[in-house]
Image (cartoon, rainbow, N blue to C red):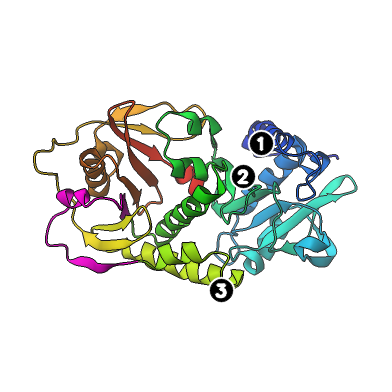
Amino acid sequence: MTMTQPAYSVARAVAPAVAEHLRLHRRALAPHDPGLPPLELLPDAQAIEALVDTAFWASVRREEGYIPKISLAFLRPIDEIQPLIFAQPLPLDPSALTRLAAAVERPGIHLGVWPDGDRLTVWGTTHAIPPFCFVVEVIAAGLLVLKHRPRHESRKFVNVAVLEGDRIKIVDEGASKIADCPALLTTMLGFDIGIADNDALNLQVQIALSMRRHGRGGILLVVPSSTNKWRESIVHPIAYAVEPPFTELRDLLAAQGKMPDHEWMDAINRAIDALAGLTAVDGATIITDHYEQLAFGAKIGRREGGTQVEQIVVTEPVEGSRPQWMHPGQLGGTRHLSAAQFVQDQPDAQALVASQDGRFTIFAWSPCDAAVHAHRVEALLL
């Protein structure tokens, strides 16, 4: 198809890497799987350029003072996705998308884009995104996320790249291969690690997303269910202890497949948002690795006899990123320092920290480094 040179130079720079990512992952799967698109239905670099360029210029426009938050999906209007089809397709043009944005800005609504002759057009909208469908989403002015739906069942898209102005962050899939990579990070990167584990870990991803959405910041401590040693690192009395432990999430996870899917999904979403809401209270929310809620608003203190955390290793799962050693106070404020101290004192636990500015960090103990490892993962949660 013929296209003009994109005015947003980042579109040209990132498109080949994204196109190759999609094709490599598609080739790695069963070639005749009826649930996957043929290779020829994946976007080429030119199509990706056009989508990214248009989304960027739409994002820096204003419609009645609002940023046009849109999602562009590269797919055909097939019956399986229950498409809403415009009688006259719209040009893939920033001004046309800006005018339309108010009608499609709610989460889960995507504008379908497909070639019409030698040009790309917007044919309508859909709520259903098939596996490996490429999506460009406008998060804020000049902030775009390039992603696709993973093959396994998941409500979380797999992020391929994050673009912010002239900054490009391409997700580094190799981050999952480091010796101390938490299973939660592997799930965020989009790797299937087994159905039994994946259901529970996808739940952690949804909790992280909900924590980030409320925008108040917070700490979630995930402690082993087999021991109460974590209490040594919490100031007592705990203002909001939960007795007996609240087991709604644990019970819902066990009930999957035993109740209608839509009822289960509604119930799990409510439970996730309720738990994430607790993290907005000053202090830490504490759950077990079996999703039993133990406390919220808890104050973290250094374990008796424990040493003050001085250095942590910080990484971000994006290409070109290098591990950095720093004092936890350099990474963030009191939340980050407290979380790092907790994990140093309780190496069998993890701490998930959401910042008010949208950053998100997983703190876990690294046996290889004999230190707390802070994984910056906001690029995976946008």
Residue kind at label 1, given as amino acid type: Val
Residue sticking out furthest to the right: 117
Sooner in the amino-acid sequence: mark 1 or mark 2: 1
Q: Quadrant of the N terminus?
A: top right
Q: CA distance from mark 1 to mark 2?
A: 8 Å
Residue 238 lies in the magenta-colored region: yes
Residue kind at label 2, given as amino acid type: Leu
Which one is closest to the eye, mark 2 or mark 3?
3
Sooner in the amino-acid sequence: mark 2 or mark 3: 2
Vertical order, 254 against 120 (above or below): below
Residue at image point 64% right, 39% down = 8
- How many other residues sit within 10 Å of disc 2, few (<14), some (14-19) or many (≥20)? many
Q: Nearer the viewer, residue 183 or 382?
A: 183
Q: Which mark is residue 146?
A: 2
Q: CA distance from mark 2 to mark 3?
A: 31 Å
Percent position of residue 218, x then y:
31, 56
Q: Is residue 160 visible?
A: yes
Pointer 3 residue: 263
